[in-house]
């Protein structure tokens, strides 16, 4: 996790003085055009200007950031002679910025760092992340997800050198999030916590952060969706997504994410929505070998499992996930999103080659992954 995190309402107002003290000269701000157009980025640029820190803005980030986005941002970074990077937005902005910062110091192509873990030789250019969603935790993890448009794949970069030096979670920046974005990013955060808790690399530390994240998200996501002005719910979601990030940045993930990455690569679908759709089906597949873990998840979501055996308690926990997803309107079907039967085998093969599959608690065949996709159709 980052060595420094600034959290809570108006946390961004602490950033300028901290950056000034570190003697940074010029930032490349990596964001998307929508955040520029609604002037939310002004909250950052005003803070930089107040402390005489120069900046240049790259606002070409796509919802599923591509290799081309990283190349475009890297070109601007060099032209503008920036000595550090600030990402502003959600996971797409942070992932793109990580790619830019890593290649800036290590050279090569971002794809060079995708065939294993911790492959970079040098620390990335200093990266500061300012988060505007409560979901991906990309502002603090060692993960970045990149889309290769040429072969329709979406792959993770897992590298300790992707860790930002400062992460800012200002809940006031999240108040204006639309309901759908609040719902999908929140379900993304829940998926992070669930997959980290049942991961084969889980530890007592990741268990603690994952379970607390599940508690906070299950109690506050619907409130944040129903009323974006609910500061208490927004603040709780901010801490929940961060705790989930702490969990999966150290314990990794599983088949939900490896499968969702393929849906993003082939169909450019919203990542959090894909996770929300797949989570119950993958959970039932995994519960065959992790029933006690899913029972714990149910308890964290408020399910009374008294008198139930492990299998029944696990099913009750999965039903609680489905109930929350339905309440925030993410319980959709892949077929309704344009997913075609003929692409399932291609996506299943790639999902099993995704690094997130390595820590799934139950190993699947290609046909079993296809079956899970079919259940979600």
Image (cartoon, rainbow, N blue to C red):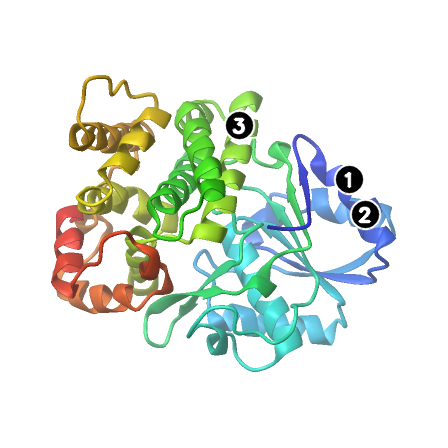
Residue lying furthest bottom in this view? 108
> As rendered, which of 237 and 54 lies closer to the eye?
237
Looking at the image, the residue that sits furthest to the front is 204
- Residue at horizontal 72%, vertical 46%? 44
Q: Answer with left or right where residue 155 lies relative to residue 143.
A: left
Which residue bears the numbered disc 3?
A: 236
Q: Which percent across, then down, holds residue 113?
A: 49, 74
Residue 51 screen position, x and y as percent: 86, 48
Q: Residues within 10 Å of mark 3 (few under 14, many from 20)?
A: many
**Residue located at (24% from left, 17% from top):** 306
Q: Which type of secondary structure does the marked residue at label 1 adopt?
A: helix
The reply to whether discs 3 and 1 touch (Cβ–Cβ < 8 Å) is no
Q: Which residue is mark 2?
A: 18
Where is 347 relative to 255, above or below?
Answer: below
In the image, 179: left or right of 45? left
Q: With 351 as the anchor, is 284 left or right in this view?
A: left
- Is 201 drawn above or below residue 293 in the view shown? below
Q: Which of 156 and 316 lies nearest the eye of the viewer?
A: 316
- Where's residue 76, x and y in %? 67, 72
Secondary structure of residue under mark 3: helix
Q: Is 148 situated left or right of 104 in this image?
A: left
Check if mark 2's residue and mark 1's residue have beta carbons within 8 Å: yes
């Amino acid at each position: 996790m980052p060595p420094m995190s600034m959290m809570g309402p108006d946390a961004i107002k602490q950033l300028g003085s901290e950056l000034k003290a570190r003697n940074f000269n010029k930032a490349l701000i990596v964001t998307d055009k929508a955040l520029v157009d609604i002037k939310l980025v002004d909250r950052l640029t005003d803070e930089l200007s107040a402390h005489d820190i120069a900046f240049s803005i790259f606002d070409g980030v796509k919802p599923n950031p591509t290799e081309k986005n990283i190349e475009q941002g890297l070109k601007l970074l060099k032209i503008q002679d920036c000595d550090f990077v600030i990402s502003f937005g959600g996971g797409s902005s942070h992932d793109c910025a990580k790619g830019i910062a890593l290649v800036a110091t290590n050279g090569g192509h971002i794809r060079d760092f995708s065939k294993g873990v911790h492959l970079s030789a040098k620390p990335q250019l200093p990266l500061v992340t300012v988060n505007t969603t409560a979901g991906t935790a990309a502002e603090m993890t060692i993960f970045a997800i990149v889309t290769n448009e040429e072969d329709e794949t979406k792959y993770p970069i897992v590298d300790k050198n992707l860790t930002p030096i400062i992460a800012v979670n200002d809940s006031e920046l999240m108040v204006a999030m639309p309901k759908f974005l609040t719902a999908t990013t929140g379900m993304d955060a829940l998926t992070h916590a669930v997959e980290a808790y049942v991961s084969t690399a889980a530890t007592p530390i990741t268990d603690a952060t994952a379970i607390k994240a599940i508690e906070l998200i299950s109690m506050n996501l619907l409130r944040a969706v129903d009323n974006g002005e609910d500061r208490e719910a927004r603040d709780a979601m901010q801490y929940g997504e961060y705790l989930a990030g702490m969990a999966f940045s150290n314990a990794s993930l599983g088949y939900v994410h490896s499968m969702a990455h393929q849906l993003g690569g082939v169909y450019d679908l919203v990542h959090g929505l894909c996770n929300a759709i797949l989570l119950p089906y993958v959970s039932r597949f995994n519960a065959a070998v992790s029933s006690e873990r899913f029972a714990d998840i149910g308890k964290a979501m408020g399910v009374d499992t008294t008198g139930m055996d492990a299998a029944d308690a696990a099913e009750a926990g999965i039903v609680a996930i489905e109930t929350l997803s339905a309440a925030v309107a993410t319980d959709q079907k892949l077929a309704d999103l344009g997913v075609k039967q003929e692409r399932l085998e291609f996506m299943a093969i790639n999902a099993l080659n995704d690094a997130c599959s390595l820590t799934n608690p139950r190993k699947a065949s290609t046909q079993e992954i296809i079956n899970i996709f079919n259940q979600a159709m």
